[in-house]
Structure formats: C-alpha cells, structure tokens
Image (spheres, rainbow, N blue to C red):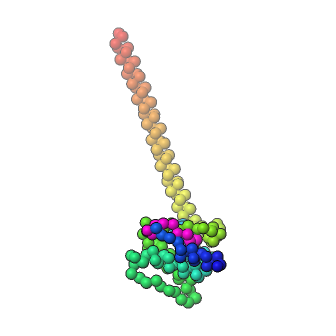
C-alpha cells in the first residue's frame, strides 16, 4: 500500500467519538489548522499541489459525513479537469459550515505528509493585525501604569497632610 493510499485508509478508519474525538488525517489537520491563519486560495493551492485526488476525495467524504446528520444535501462527485480544485473548495466550505463543537480534532501522524510552508506562505495581514493588538495592549498597560503613579503620588500627599495635621494637633495639645 502506498503512502497516499495509507493516508486515505487512515481517514476512513479514523474514529470519531461523538464527532468530537481525534481523527488522524494529515490533509484535514492541515486544512483545519490553516483555515484561520492563511488565505483560502493559498491553502487550496498548497493542498492541490501536495495531496493526490484519492486523499482529497476521502477527506471530502469524511467532512461530508460529519455534516450529513444536519444537512439534507448529497455529496457532490466532481468531474473534469477542475475536479481536484473544486473538491478542495467543497472541503473548505463544509469545514466552515460545521459547528466548531462538532468538529473532531484532526491530527497528523506523519509530519512529512503535511505541505511544507515557507515565509512566502504566510499572510502578513494577520501578523500586522496581531502587532496592532499588541500595540493596543501596551498602550493600555502604560495607561494603567500612569494611573498607579498618580495614585501613589496622591497617597503620598495625603500621608504628608495627615502627618502635618497630627503634628499641629499634638502641638496645640501641648500648649
């Protein structure tokens, strides 16, 4: 059995405990983990270039079976020269349509069977978004620090005033 046939077999034999278990499938692991962090067209291209048609069909069938109880649609069997790309798009749509609580945790048994990623594959917009959030958090911390400093100064002045009042009070009692 070839590596690609073995991957399809691991998908077919992957158990789902109440649809929220752990399923060993490298393609679905890659798809589910990169959906939120990479542009959809780039994820589609990486899957298209790395996995064969049988692996894609098996993964699509598995995702379709996950949604079947809540969906009256039938599994669309794609044909033609654009079949592989259309199947990948179907998988992306199915995965996005599923309730997160119903999606099992897809894991990779063989990390070498995940598409390699280079720096060119990362979406800089998500990095910039994270950087902007980090800057906002830093500004919030600076604001809190300023408030703490002002409170300390205020408490220091209050303590000095209290000491002064106590000295005046002691002096007036002594006279």
Asked if 157 appears above or below 174 in the picture, the reply is below
Q: Is residue 119 left or right of residue 39?
A: right
Q: For the C terminus, which image quadrant?
A: top left
What residue sits 55% from the left and 58% below the top? 131
What residue sits 45% from the left and 74% below the top? 66
Position in image of residue 24 (x %, y %)? 55, 69
Position in image of residue 2 (x %, y %)? 65, 78
Q: Is residue 154 left or right of residue 116?
A: left
What residue sits 64% from the left and 79% below the top? 1
- Does any portion of residue 41 appear in the rendered image? no
Residue 25 belongs to the span the image colors magenta = yes
Position in image of residue 46 (x %, y %)? 60, 75
Furthest residue to the bottom? 80
Position in image of residue 98 (x %, y %)? 44, 72
Q: Is residue 168 left or right of residue 122?
A: left
Judging depth in this view, the residue of 130 and 115 nearest the camera is 115
Judging depth in this view, the residue of 130 and 36 nearest the camera is 36
Judging depth in this view, the residue of 65 and 1 nearest the camera is 1
- Based on the displayed image, in which of its 4 quarters is residue 6 positioned? bottom right
- Does any portion of residue 152 appear in the rendered image? yes
What residue sits 57% from the left and 73% below the top? 10
Residue 119 belongs to the span the image colors magenta = no
Please report the bounds of the magenta region as a residue range.
18-27
């Amino acid at each position: 059995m070839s590596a690609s046939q073995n991957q399809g077999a691991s998908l077919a034999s992957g158990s789902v405990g109440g649809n929220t278990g752990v399923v060993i499938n490298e393609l679905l692991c890659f798809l589910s983990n990169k959906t939120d962090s990479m542009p959809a067209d780039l994820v589609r291209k990486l899957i298209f270039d790395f996995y064969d048609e049988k692996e894609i069909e098996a993964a699509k069938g598995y995702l379709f079976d996950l949604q079947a109880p809540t969906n009256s649609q039938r599994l669309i069997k794609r044909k033609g020269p654009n079949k592989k790309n259309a199947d990948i798009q179907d998988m992306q749509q199915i995965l996005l349509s599923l309730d997160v609580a119903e999606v099992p945790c897809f894991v990779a048994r063989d990390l070498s069977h995940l598409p390699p990623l280079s720096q060119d594959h990362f979406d800089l917009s998500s990095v910039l978004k994270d950087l902007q959030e980090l800057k906002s958090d830093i500004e919030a911390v600076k604001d809190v620090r300023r408030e703490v400093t002002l409170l300390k100064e205020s408490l220091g002045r209050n303590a000095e005033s209290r000491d002064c009042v106590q000295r005046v009070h002691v002096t007036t009692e002594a006279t």
